[in-house]
Image: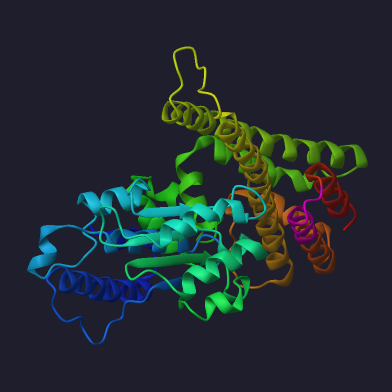
């Protein structure tokens, strides 16, 4: 096992990152021994990982971070950095390494106030590890001010600082930032590769793994959740039944409310799991006395945490809605494939009766209009339209399509 084993279907990317990690190790080793630095190196100070949802761009960046922080004794004997077991690899993969800072959007944007401390830290030397690493999981969500703050740090980085930026496409990142990064594009892994990973690593039954991989069309994270979480399978089953229910206005409005409520419940569950722990940890760090009373002057810090948690709940609800909309899109794509008689593999084979019924009862043109209605709903949500309003408009369009 190495840190690269979790990068499903990304052999080319793994090879590039492995070579860079080897050269990075040589740079640190030479500097520590006060020896001349290697003249040629595949390592650079800024990387941009792009790829479609589910391709594993964040996983690739984190695996690279782990390889850069690897402290396995085998390295000195010619072993590959990224053993996956040493303290450097383990803590980097878990997100607890002191010199690996992760930035993820908790709302629609990454605000400049959320980047100030991170940018400041990027100019310091690593405390314990071999590199100071800044991993930005949602670089496409940097707004103008926060992107400019990152640009200044990427333009003149500290000698042992590495920026790892992740975004869906290269066009989602400020041109002046991406021009200073080495670009790696990940592709969607095959259904077979994802199914094999679920069986091998997660112990999922082969039939369940194949069904989850096929249903999510190679989206690694969603496939794992679908294969291992019965509640996720129940939610998907409910979504796939929705198209046959949209026979009147009342049914459309009810279906929209159910989708929004299900997403809100997902967000609430996540909040219950994360918010309480974060709040108690921050209180302890601030020196709260018995009974939970905080020292004077710390109320503002707690208010900042509450604001962040509120933004995260909103984003989580919309992310959950987006999963349901993705399932609906795949459903109508299957309907269209049946209508056109193509040889495209059906993603939702477990809903074949419903697919056949809609395929016979509508035209390819109406199916395309329904797919466009789902896309319009996703765009509306990105523009911060009220979720219920956006979903109601979509379900009405699905009925009329």
Q: Is residue 19 left or right of residue 172?
A: left
Q: Foreground: 232 or 319?
A: 319
The colour scheme used here is rainbow
Q: Main secondary structure of the magenta part?
A: helix
Residue 76: x %, y % from top left:
10, 66
84 vs 250: above or below: below
Q: Is residue 77 visible?
A: yes
348 displayed left or right of 396: left
The quarter holding residue 378 reads bottom right
Q: Quadrant of residue 143?
A: bottom right
Residue sitting at x 54%, y 31%: 275
Q: Residue at x 45, y 53 (%)?
A: 102
Q: Is residue 312 above or below residue 188?
A: above
Q: Who's the residue at 37% across and 60% down the image?
A: 124
Residue at image coords 45%, 29%? 286
Residue found at the very far front of the displayed protein = 296
Instruction: Determine whether, in the image, residue 237 is placed left or right of residue 57.
Output: right
Which residue is most to the left? Answer: 77
Q: Looking at this view, is 182 or 361 the one in front?
A: 182
Quadrant location, the C terminus: bottom right
- Span colored in magenta: 375-385
- State yes or no: residue 77 in magenta: no
Q: Can you give x and y, in whole percent of width and height, for residue 151 in the image?
A: 54, 71
Quarter where residue 242 is shown? top right
88 or 193: which is nearer to us? 88
Q: Is residue 379 magenta?
A: yes
Question: What x and y, as percent, mark residue 120?
Answer: 46, 58
Quarter of the image that includes the N terminus: bottom left
Q: Nearer the viewer, residue 360 or 309?
A: 309
Residue 45 percent coordinates (x, y): 38, 73
Query: Looking at the image, which residue sits at the far bottom?
Result: 39
State whether residue 211 appears in this view. Answer: no
């Amino acid at each position: 096992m190495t840190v690269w084993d979790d990068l499903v279907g990304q052999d080319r990317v793994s090879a590039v990152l492995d070579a860079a990690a080897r050269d990075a190790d040589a740079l640190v080793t030479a500097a520590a021994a006060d020896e001349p630095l290697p003249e040629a190196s595949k390592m650079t100070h800024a990387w941009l990982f792009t790829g479609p949802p589910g391709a594993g761009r964040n996983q690739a960046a984190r695996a690279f971070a782990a390889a850069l922080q690897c402290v396995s004794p085998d390295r000195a004997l010619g072993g590959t950095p990224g053993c996956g077991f040493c303290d450097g690899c383990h803590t980097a993969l878990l997100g607890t390494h002191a010199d690996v800072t992760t930035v993820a959007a908790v709302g629609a944007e990454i605000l400049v106030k959320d980047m100030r401390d991170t940018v400041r830290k990027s100019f310091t030397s690593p405390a314990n590890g071999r590199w100071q690493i800044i991993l930005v999981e949602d670089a496409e969500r940097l707004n103008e001010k926060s992107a400019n703050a990152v640009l200044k740090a990427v333009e003149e980085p500290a000698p042992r600082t590495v920026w790892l930026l992740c975004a869906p496409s290269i066009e989602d990142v400020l041109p002046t930032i991406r021009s200073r990064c080495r670009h790696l594009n990940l592709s969607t892994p095959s259904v077979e590769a994802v199914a094999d990973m679920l069986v091998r690593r997660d112990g999922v039954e082969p039939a369940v793994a194949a069904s989850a991989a096929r249903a999510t069309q190679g989206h690694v994270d969603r496939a794992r959740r679908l294969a291992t979480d019965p509640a996720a399978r129940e939610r998907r089953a409910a979504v796939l039944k929705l198209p046959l229910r949209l026979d009147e206005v009342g049914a459309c409005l009810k279906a929209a409310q159910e989708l929004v409520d299900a997403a809100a419940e997902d967000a609430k569950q996540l909040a219950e799991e994360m918010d309480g722990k974060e709040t108690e940890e921050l209180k302890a760090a601030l020196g709260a006395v018995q009974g939970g009373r905080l020292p004077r002057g710390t109320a503002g810090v707690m208010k900042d945490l509450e604001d962040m948690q509120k933004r995260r709940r909103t984003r989580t609800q919309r992310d959950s809605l987006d999963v349901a909309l993705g399932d609906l899109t795949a459903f109508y794509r299957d309907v269209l494939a049946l209508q056109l008689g193509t040889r495209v593999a059906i993603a939702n084979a477990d809903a074949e009766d419903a697919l056949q019924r809609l395929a016979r009862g509508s035209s390819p043109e109406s199916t395309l209009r329904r797919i466009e209605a789902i896309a319009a709903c996703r765009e509306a949500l990105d523009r911060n339209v009220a979720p219920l309003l956006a979903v109601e408009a979509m379900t009405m369009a699905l009925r009329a399509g």
